[in-house]
Amino acid sequence: MEKIKTNRWTPMIMAICVIAGIIIGSFFTSHFSGNRLSIINSGSNRLNNLLHIIDDQYVDEVNVDSLVDLAIPQILSDLDPHSTYIPAKDVQAAEDDLKGSFSGVGIEFTIREDTIHVQNVIDNGPSERAGILAGDKIVAIDGKPFVGKVVTNSEAMKRLKGPKDTKVKIGVVRYGSKGIKTFEVTRGEIPQKSISSTYMLDDNTGYIRIKNFGETTYPELLVALAKLSESGFKNLIIDLRDNTGGYLQSAVQIANEFLPKNKLIVYTQGRKSPRKDYQSDGNGSYQKLPLVVLINEGSASAAEIFAGAMQDNDRATIIGRRSFGKGLVQQQIQFPDGSLIRLTVARYYTPSGRCIQKPYEPGDEQDYAQDLLNRYQHGEFFSQDSIKHRGPAYHTSIGRVVYGGGGITPDIFVPEDTSDVTSYYKQAAMSGLILQYAFTYTDNNRPKLNNFSEMMELSDYLEKQGLVDQFASYAEQRGLKRRNLLIQKSYHLLDRYINSRIIYNMLDENAWNQYLNLDDPVIRKAQQVFATDSSFPKLTTPTETKSTAKSQKKMK
């Protein structure tokens, strides 16, 4: 009987236990896990809730996606100056800059008076094959007029770019012809060159200018070096001025070409990113080639990695002005809608241990953006003594002192020459009038200018045309008062700027660089370094350093 009674109450006891378990579980869930939920709710969930409330209850209709596009950049800007958000519509354009190619029609254009003017046509590109010429004015795309206020750079790119092998009809007005000519262009892959210039500066010295470090920069460099080898170069200048950087891997590959085995090129490290070293493998073909690297305040990121690796390993002489100081590593993270963020996850360090990144205050974008202006006003562009090293001292492989605190300070400083800069020149350059005049002159004189295929021939011809005086009259008609004394003082600068742009319009970027390098003091200084066989840095005593500084002042 006792056994039967026990069995009869068992289900009731089990039910009570289950209910008690639920009550106890609920109590602990609300008191303990509730704290965890409140932490989450205090962050991302609050943002989600806010957007839902706005979408559901706000007095007017709101585009929530637009709000997100505005909010995310603000959040990232409070972290550091280089964590960025790229909306889905801008991702392709942002990535094209560093890719080896993009799909388009193969023209370089400028917009003047609400009309697209074809500045250059890519050799053997889709537009050239279709019959479009430099100097043509594009007035219609796919049968619809494309002139007036609708003509913007982004809108033009949107209409002209497209998937490979798709077709676009382009209507142009051609100089000396009546009516509109229509060409059907089949879009194709347009190479994006990151090396803009390769040529021999003199009988022994090769010159390579790298605009950025993209996907194809390393193979482009190998081709450039092979070309210079055919000319028997014995010294090399790599020009990284105004190179804003790009891919770390490209900079590492190129540095590897010039370094012996087991040399540290750069390392990265962050809170959640363990230290990662990048070292040379000893397979580089130019480990003993005399080398000079040119930098300025526009050289950043991957350009600073390369320059820092050459400096800290005492592999090359760095000439120019202090570099930008961008040493934060971004990881690209894509959202389901196609937009993405580039989030800073680590910092770059040179082989000696210097952090390339210049100081910044989180959320203070304005001061950071004005850093170069502050350097200019402080006199850093004109005097090496004005460079303030805010970081500690480090040492290169042979013991030379280098400084942290942001950017790469060159071994040889060359100041910016502003002795001939006048208020007239500044207005002419900043207003865009010089560019407009150069393009107008090019457009109006193409039949004659087409006779010149070499830079020096074209330069000699332009020197005899009195273009500065012609420009002054052109500019005066457009509101820039003629100031003869100031024009005379800035004559060389005006002449150089005008001629360089016409050479660029008629020839290419390589010819443009060659012309500008003719009287470049930084180039001259590099040639002096090779002439004295001093491209490989040596450890100098304080006495030697002072005497060198005095001799440099005398040369100025």
Image (cartoon, helix red, strand yellow):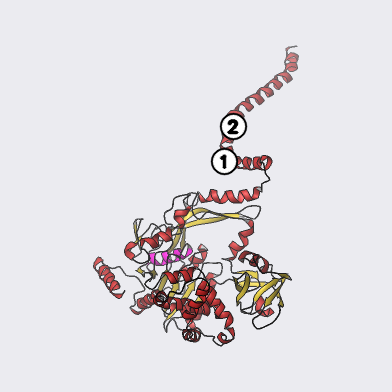
Among numbered discs 1 and 2, the one appearing first in the sequence: 2
Answer yes or no: is residue 224 visible: no
Return the x and y of residue 339 as percentages of the image width and height: 62, 55
Amino acid bearing label 1: Gly
Q: CA distance from mark 1 to mark 2?
A: 15 Å
Q: Residue at x 41, y 67 (%)?
A: 310
Residue 292 picture quarter: bottom left
Residue occupying image coordinates x 54% and y 86% = 452
Q: Position of residue 289 (x, y in %)?
A: 41, 76
Lateral position of residue 66 relative to residue 502, left or right: right
Q: Quadrant of the C terminus?
A: bottom left
Q: Nearer the viewer, residue 11 or 212?
A: 212
Q: Is residue 75 above or below residue 150?
A: above
Q: Quadrant of residue 527?
A: bottom left
At 41% from the left and 82% from the top, the residue drawn is 204
135 lies left or right of 362: right
Magenta segment boundaries in residue numbering? 302-314
Q: Which mark is residue 462?
A: none
- Looking at the rendered structure, the secondary structure element under dot 2 is helix
Tell me residue 137's x, y (percent): 64, 75
The 10 Å Cα crowd at callout 1, few under 14, some 14 to 19, many 20 or more, is: few
Using the image as rendered, state which of residue 260 and residue 189 is in the foreground. 189
Look at the image and say whether residue 303 sits in the magenta stretch: yes
Residue 308 is at least partly visible in this image: yes
| Residue annotated with mark 1 | 43
Label 1 SS: loop
